[in-house]
Image (cartoon, coloured by chain):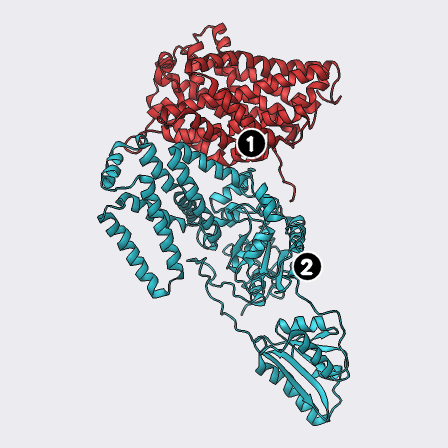
């Protein structure tokens, strides 16, 4: 077979980052923003975006310092074999738990809106099995999937965003500059969970064929996601008000269900579900793939595909072990706090240690 | 990949040499005609259509051997037998190799020195002439086998464009391509594949445009093929495909010479197979299956609209039954209340569950479709009427199926023909059933997940290293625009980058300064067309035409 022309080129990396962020972050963000900040929750989105910049810098910086290696491979180089392996295991557990909580969370939507009579295990199983297929085929296929869907998905999402303005009430988001900066900052930290899929970049950046453009491309994807996230948060709060948003478990879906084209289409909810499902498919496949890839590297086995299959029952078991929605939200809240340490703080420390002790390639930043 | 192993690896212990025919040993032709003929008869037997014509003048002088079913006897008589007889009558002998070559009034004469080449040439339709006291036999080709006339291709009709379709004869097909592309860089590589059929294959590509890696890879894959016979180009397309376990076509097939010529100009490689009216083109991306020559015949707005309609038709053909089933049986709450009323009232007397009803109707339509293809012309009309009446009227009256279901299945069947390639359309037929069953099990969720799974599969495919879903994945912005819209020629300056051609530029503007235009004037005036569009047709490039007065 001839070598692929682009590999994971800039286009594919952009699509992968954007799709995985969108799939992971968009649905519950208005709720988190409204809960932690209130009517000015949209400012938290700006803060979360600013927090994401050092993470991107760490991804690119560590990628340059350790080209062709994932975080699992270079952690032992930075911290020594023992600590490196332990930190690698923690990172892998974080990826695994991300996948489990995300899977369980989205399953709730389908159980509530589409498959009322189907047992939870059946819904979790089919979503997991469907996502396992691209994960088995690898990151190239996952990113191509994101790329193929990009035009249609974001066209529909943009139309939905525009049409959602019909119920928008500016009073719900006023006064614009009245928020307490500390509350906004802490809310922004909570909203940073939307950028958790960037953890996958520490695993896949090694396959990026144009690392000199890494900072620009990932930032561009983050910026596009920020624009959509900001608009969805502001519109959801604008339509339902901060208190109204808290009434709904899936506020963005409720927003799209309310959006209509008079006399033509009575709800956009179904179309949004389709396009959002396509994005969570990519996110979940990415999480599954990176976890499997990480396991393969941690155990020193080259074939990640076996781990994709091995992880399926583990994830299924863990996802079904969460008893109910209240426990799930408790776990998610704790996970949002822990995640900041794993995604933002830990890579920055690693980068600093690598720089300080001259680990990896010396010409790295 | 267990199945892949079973399907691709030869079984242990199988004697692969058994697929080869027991070929003639490498043996040289002798100077004795009778001995040569005896040996040949022993090798190929005495088939009923074998003709041996002996020329004698005080003993054997020459012998002409051919298969009556493949060579034209009357042409052989007038171009070979008559000149030889006249020569013998006039000179009374002295027929040597040089004399004979002068006598034969044919453009090309082949010289053979060993029997294996003689047998191969006789079996491929040549007549072979043995001369006494000569160790070289002469081969001439006067094909006499039946040829199909050049007709409009039945599977790829267009309302605007060439009416020529490939025939079953390789040389005719090659000629049709050559009439499109008069470029010395057009490489035509000849191969023979099939141990027993020795089917002639021609590879066509532009040496300075086609990606050399693709050409090399294609030749390697063809060289690896070991099979007893190639009956149709479909055999080859399966054998050279990158991915064996897929139902999507990874090699484009077409009956249209203009499509092949356009593909070769894009930098792709065409494969012509003798006795097959379908040429193959590699590499191919999924978008190619939705483009027709008519897109380029009409205005680009119309061409773009046609492409959109084809894509929409395909989408409807694949998704409509699944979506309909998901909506009526699992997620009716997603339908508008008015529509729910219409559907449920139409189904109120139907005794079957929705899944069985829709499946039954779909299967019946599939059977009708298969039957109509094979039915004689007049009967297919009756089938159409009977089928329409049976399902559309009687089925609904008997409350076996609902009217809405019939409408959905009929729209699906009609929309399926929007795909411009039959191979791709057949693949979508299978996908339709997959999506249908997924929707039957899990409603809208199953429907979307099945669609995404099929897309994932398509994303994993490659055709000679080119991603199947290029230019969408990986993204190539310019090609992406061209796959959805038909970009006008004046804005279409490059070849598709997906195929990685050596030369990317495709159009340009000629500098007309100092050239006389075709009206014979010295300098072009303001009224003359200076857009350079005439140049793009190549008219001004014809030798000797520069500055000539057409009058």
Q: Residue at point 49% right, 13% down?
A: A331
Tag 1 subunit: A
Mark 1 vs 2: CB contact within 8 A = no
To which residue does mark 2 refer? Answer: B17
**Which residue occupies the foreground of this view, A281 or B98?**
A281
Residue B177 in the figure: left or right of residue A351: left
Give the quadrant of residue A110.
top left
Between disc 1 and disc 2, the foreground one is: 2
Is A170 drawn above or below residue B351 in the view shown?
A: above
* A80 over A111 or under it: above or below: above
Q: Nearer the viewer, residue B514 or A103?
A: A103
What is the CA distance from the residue labelled 1 to the residue labelled 2?
42 Å
A333 sits left or right of B181 in the view: left
Question: Callout 2: 10 Å neighbours few (<14), some, many (20+)?
Answer: few
Residue lying at 72% horizontally and 19% vertically, measured from the top left: A77
Q: Position of residue A158 (x, y in %)?
A: 43, 29
B125 left or right, relative to B439:
right
Q: Find residue B551 and name its label.
A: none
Q: Is residue A8 left or right of residue B154?
A: right
Report x, y in % for residue B18. 66, 60
Q: What chain is colored red?
A: A
Residue A98 image offset from top left, x and y in percent:
53, 20
The hue of chain B in the figure is cyan
Per the image, label 2 sits on a secondary structure element best described as helix
State the SS at label 1.
helix
Residue visible at 74% across and 87% down in the picture:
B95
Q: Quadrant of residue B112?
A: bottom right
Callout 2: chain = B
Using the rendered image of the protein, determine whether residue A226 is visible from the camera's viewpoint. no
Q: What count of labels does the image hold?
A: 2
Q: Which residue is mark 1?
A: A135
């Amino acid at each position: 077979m001839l070598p692929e022309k682009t590999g994971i080129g800039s286009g594919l990396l952009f699509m992968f980052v954007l799709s995985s962020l969108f799939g992971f972050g968009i649905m519950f963000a208005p709720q988190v923003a409204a809960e932690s900040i209130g009517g000015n929750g949209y400012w938290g989105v700006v803060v979360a975006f600013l927090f994401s910049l050092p993470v991107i810098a760490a991804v690119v910086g560590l990628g340059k310092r350790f080209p062709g290696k994932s975080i699992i491979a270079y952690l032992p180089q930075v911290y020594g074999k023992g600590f490196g392996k332990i930190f690698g295991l923690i990172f892998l557990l974080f990826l695994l738990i991300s996948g489990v909580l995300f899977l369980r969370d989205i399953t709730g939507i389908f159980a509530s809106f589409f498959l009322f009579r189907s047992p939870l295990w059946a819904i979790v199983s089919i979503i997991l099995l469907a996502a396992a297929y691209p994960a088995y085929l690898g990151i190239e296929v996952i990113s191509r999937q994101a790329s193929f869907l990009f035009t249609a998905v974001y066209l529909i999402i943009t139309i939905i965003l525009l049409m959602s303005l019909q119920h928008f009430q500016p009073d719900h988001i006023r006064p614009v500059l009245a928020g307490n900066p500390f509350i906004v900052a802490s809310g922004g930290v909570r909203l940073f969970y939307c950028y958790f899929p960037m953890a996958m970049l520490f695993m896949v950046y090694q396959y990026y064929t144009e690392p000199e453009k890494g900072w620009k491309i990932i930032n561009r994807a983050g910026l596009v996601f920020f624009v959509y996230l900001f608009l969805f948060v502001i519109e959801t709060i604008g339509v339902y008000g901060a208190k109204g948003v808290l009434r709904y478990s899936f506020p963005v879906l409720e927003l799209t269900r309310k959006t209509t084209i008079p006399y033509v289409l009575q709800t956009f909810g179904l179309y949004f579900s389709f396009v959002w499902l396509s994005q969570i498919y990519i996110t979940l496949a990415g999480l599954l793939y990176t976890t499997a890839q990480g396991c393969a590297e941690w155990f020193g086995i080259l074939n990640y595909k076996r781990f994709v299959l091995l992880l399926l029952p583990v994830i299924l078991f863990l996802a079904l072990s969460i008893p109910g929605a209240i426990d799930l939200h408790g776990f998610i809240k704790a996970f949002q706090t822990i995640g900041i340490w794993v995604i933002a703080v830990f890579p920055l420390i690693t980068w600093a240690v690598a720089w300080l002790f001259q680990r990896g390639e010396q010409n790295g930043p | 990949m267990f199945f892949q192993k079973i399907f691709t690896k030869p079984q242990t212990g199988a004697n692969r040499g058994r697929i080869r025919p027991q070929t003639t040993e490498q043996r040289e032709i002798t100077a004795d005609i009778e001995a040569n003929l005896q040996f040949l008869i022993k090798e190929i037997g005495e088939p009923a259509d074998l003709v041996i014509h002996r020329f004698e003048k005080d003993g054997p002088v020459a012998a002409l051997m051919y298969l009556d079913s493949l060579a034209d006897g009357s042409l052989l008589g007038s171009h070979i037998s008559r000149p030889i007889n006249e020569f013998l009558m006039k000179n009374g002998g002295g027929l040597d190799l040089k004399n004979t070559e002068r006598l034969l009034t044919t453009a090309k004469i082949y010289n053979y020195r060993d029997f294996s080449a003689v047998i191969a040439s006789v079996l491929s339709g040549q007549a072979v002439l043995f001369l006494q006291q000569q160790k070289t036999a002469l081969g001439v080709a006067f094909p006499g086998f039946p040829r199909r006339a050049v007709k409009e291709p039945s599977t790829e009709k267009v309302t605007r464009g060439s009416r020529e379709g490939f025939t079953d004869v390789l040389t005719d097909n090659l000629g049709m391509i050559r009439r499109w592309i008069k470029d010395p860089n057009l490489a035509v590589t000849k191969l023979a594949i099939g141990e027993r059929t020795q089917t002639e294959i021609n590879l066509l590509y532009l040496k300075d445009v086609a990606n050399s890696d693709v050409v090399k890879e294609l030749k390697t894959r063809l060289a690896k093929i070991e099979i007893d016979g190639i009956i149709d180009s479909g055999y080859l397309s399966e054998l050279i495909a990158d991915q064996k376990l897929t139902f999507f076509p990874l090699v484009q097939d077409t009956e249209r010479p203009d499509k092949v010529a356009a593909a070769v100009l894009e930098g792709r490689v065409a494969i012509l197979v003798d006795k097959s009216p379908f040429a193959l083109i590699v590499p191919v991306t999924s978008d190619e299956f939705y483009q027709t020559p008519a897109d380029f015949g009409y205005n680009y707005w119309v061409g773009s609209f046609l492409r959109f309609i084809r894509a929409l038709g395909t989408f409807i053909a694949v998704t409509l039954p699944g979506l309909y089933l998901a909506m009526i049986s699992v997620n009716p709450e997603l339908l508008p209340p008015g529509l729910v009323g219409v559907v449920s009232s139409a189904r109120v007397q139907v005794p079957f569950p929705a899944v069985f009803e829709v499946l039954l109707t779909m299967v019946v339509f599939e059977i009708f479709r298969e039957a109509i293809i094979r039915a004689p012309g007049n009967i297919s009309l009756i089938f159409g009427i009977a089928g329409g009446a049976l399902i559309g009227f009687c089925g609904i009256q008997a409350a076996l199926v609902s009217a809405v279901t019939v409408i959905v299945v009929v729209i699906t069947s009609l929309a399926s023909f929007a795909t411009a390639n039959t191979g791709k359309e057949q693949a979508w037929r299978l996908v339709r059933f997959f999506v249908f069953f997924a929707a039957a099990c899990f409603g809208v969720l199953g429907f979307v997940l099945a669609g995404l799974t099929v897309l994932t599969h398509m994303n994993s495919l490659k055709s000679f290293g080119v991603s199947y879903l290029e230019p969408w994945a990986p993204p190539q912005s310019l090609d992406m625009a061209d796959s959805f819209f038909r970009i006008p020629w004046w804005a279409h300056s490059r070849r598709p980058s997906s195929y990685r051609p050596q030369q990317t530029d495709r159009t340009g503007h000629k500098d007309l300064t100092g050239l006389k235009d075709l009206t014979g004037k010295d300098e072009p005036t303001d009224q003359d067309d200076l857009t350079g569009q005439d140049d793009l047709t190549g008219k001004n490039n014809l030798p000797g035409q520069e500055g000539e007065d057409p009058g």
